[in-house]
Image: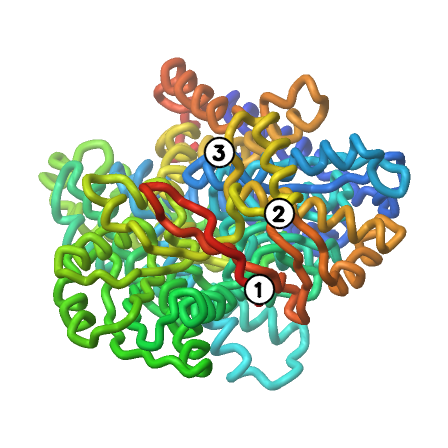
Amino acid sequence: MKHPGARRWFLVAAVLSLGLGWAQDRLDPYFVDILTRIGINVILAVSLNLINGHTGQFSLGHAGFMGVGAYTAAALTLFAGPKLLPAGAGFWVEQLWFLVALGAAGLVAALAGLLVGAPSLRLKGDYLAIVTLGFGQIIAVIFRNIESLGGALGLNGIPARTNLFWSFAAAALTVYVVTALVNSTYGRGFLATHDDEVAAEAMGMNTTRYKIVAFVTGAFFAGIAGGLSGHFTLTINPKGFDFNKSIEIVVMVIVGGMGRTVGVIIAAVLLTLLPEGLRMLSSASPSLKWIGETRPLLYAILLIALMMLRPQGLFTWKRKKGAVTA
Amino acid sequence: MSLPTAVHRRVFLGVAVAALLAVGCKPSGGGAGTGTEIPVGEFASLTGSEAAFGRSSHNGTVLAIEQLNAAGGVLGKQFKLITEDNQSKDGESATAVKKLISRDQVVAVLGEVASGRSLEAAPICQQYKVPQISPSSTNPKVTEMGDYIFRVCFVDPFQGTVMAKFAANTLKAKKVAVLTDVGAPYSVGLGTFFKERFVADGGTVVAEQKFTKDDKDFKAQLTAIKSAAPDAIFVPAYYGQVTLIVMQARELGITVPLFGGDGWEAPELLQGPGAAAALEGCYFSTHFSPDQDSPRAKEFVKAYEAKFGAKPDAMAALGYDSALLLSDAIKRAGSAEPEKIRPVLAATKDFDGVTGKMTLNAQRNAEKSAVIIGIKGGKFVYTETVNP
């Protein structure tokens, strides 16, 4: 049996997302909510995995790029949209404009990634973690102080554009691009940088360039995830893109297994479902009510147990011969 | 086909199928309030950074529901309160509220303290046409999200008006200085509304000074204020800096009273050496005081202390009122259907809550009295109630 390529998976996922987008109105809104967030978290985790997993850098600022994307996309649909689009524009025009907004969100986030990455990725070691940590803080402070972007209260009344189609299609695109990139000839450069930076440089590779490409690509998809998330929660504020959000994404990557795309996808799905599962469990019967109250604690204990028992991540099958990533 | 791929694919498909199965179909509607119980949803920050506020508000709501049920409920049915925690995290409230509406079929949603998270839930409540009553989000934006969104607290502009009246009538001030934190929308808004009303009522603002969040030294601003010789100084800021401002004012020999809004209300205001003495004779406005002289408030304070062993604060009183208002609206509507509750809620007039008599205006904000608390002998002392 032939190994199904990334492209085939992408097509399957795209068709599936179209179907789900169509079926959205017939489904329970609570589940639509969870599924949409799964899509967004998959984008965030897989794109961070390109930086932290495949290329072996350590970014703590992924939520910052998400924030840049969220504000860019929201500004385009909220402020620019009504001015540029003809009044009473139909459904398709709105959807098309949302696509433009998402693209712009990705590009602006990628530009931010380039600005942060180009100087700091020349360094080796843990410096990137500190620089990206600082970047995340700076982004939050900037948004908090721009009055036209709502200051500390953020932007409200963002039109509801994100649905299951956008969320899943963007997730499929992210997985496809990252997998295809890492599996390509060029992509071996990321892995070489990860495995042994000194040796890779000795072979004449420009590891800085590979690191920047990985970083900028990751930032691009984080920006798209931000755009989707803003048009999904309909309100964004600087606090939603702080250090805690970055850590959430890092946890998904570590739980899934650094550099294992399938593992990271499953981790993103499970870690989105877990808090909601605990919520459902606690409302199932009065004797289980304590679960709801200790939810954050249970979550933390599960993470600690996981890291002690499976420090390499949950899903680390052997790589198939010939395929670089699982 | 090698083994690992088979495993991957099976897991992948398994997860996908499980997710799809879990989706299920839309639960059939029409269940809202038709059983023997009336399901009421609440989302609150029970854990995380703002848990102190969230817990207070939640306790108030729980107490109200218990008392209502003990008194026989409403329309012959008992209330069933379903509470979801959002961990004080952004992005969780929307999910929690969707769960309350679609799974638990609640007839109304109570929440939240923080304006930011009330704003997250508001578009969803509006979309599914389920009334939302926020107990204590004071930002005007919250109820602007749609006609299904209400609140039982007053809004920031109202506080400015209340303090203007208080300055003119009780402090007998003719000349007032205003010192605002330009970095906080709350402070700027409150300062502006105060000035407008105070000037309209015939007073003069003799000095206007500004500072920002991280300032620790206010002597320059205070010296300028001192030279203008005001009768009182309005400081709409948060408690952390208020203490410093008042202490430095006293050091400079300013003896006139300083006063502010509900941002002052925290035990930390009086902590630190010399803070209580410096703040003696200062005032601030808030939603509720456990010492206020009204039979309803006294009853509430007694019941709350019996159940939770602590004095209720403003958040608890507002949480209590939000549940009472809902029950009152259901009774008046004669129905627990969300779409029938809404117009009745909007028409609320002179509802008698523990935080005072309230009337919901056209913007669905409560018009009600505010409480002025004075600082006397190192304690918060109830001073008076100011009506709108």
Give the residue type that dot 1 points to: Asn
Nearer to the camera, A71 or B63: B63
Q: Residue B319: x percent and y percent?
A: 60, 44
Q: Estimate the x, y position of residue B82 in percent, counting from the top left.
A: 69, 35
Question: Quick one: SS at disc 2?
Answer: loop
Image point (66%, 34%), residue name: B63
Mark 3 belongs to chain: B
Q: Is residue B279 above or below residue B80?
A: below
Q: Position of residue B178 (x, y in %)?
A: 30, 70
Sooner in the amino-acid sequence: mark 2 or mark 3 = 3
Q: Chain of mark 2?
A: B
Disc 1 to disc 3, how far (Cα)?
A: 35 Å
Q: State the mark number for residue B294.
A: 2
Residue B373 in sight: yes
Q: Is A122 or B287 nearer to us in this picture?
A: B287
Disc sitting over residue B387 in the figure: 1
Do tag 1 and tag 3 residues touch (Cβ < 8 Å)?
no
For the residue carrying disc 2, how many other residues have a C-alpha within 10 Å: few (<14), some (14-19), or many (20+)?
few
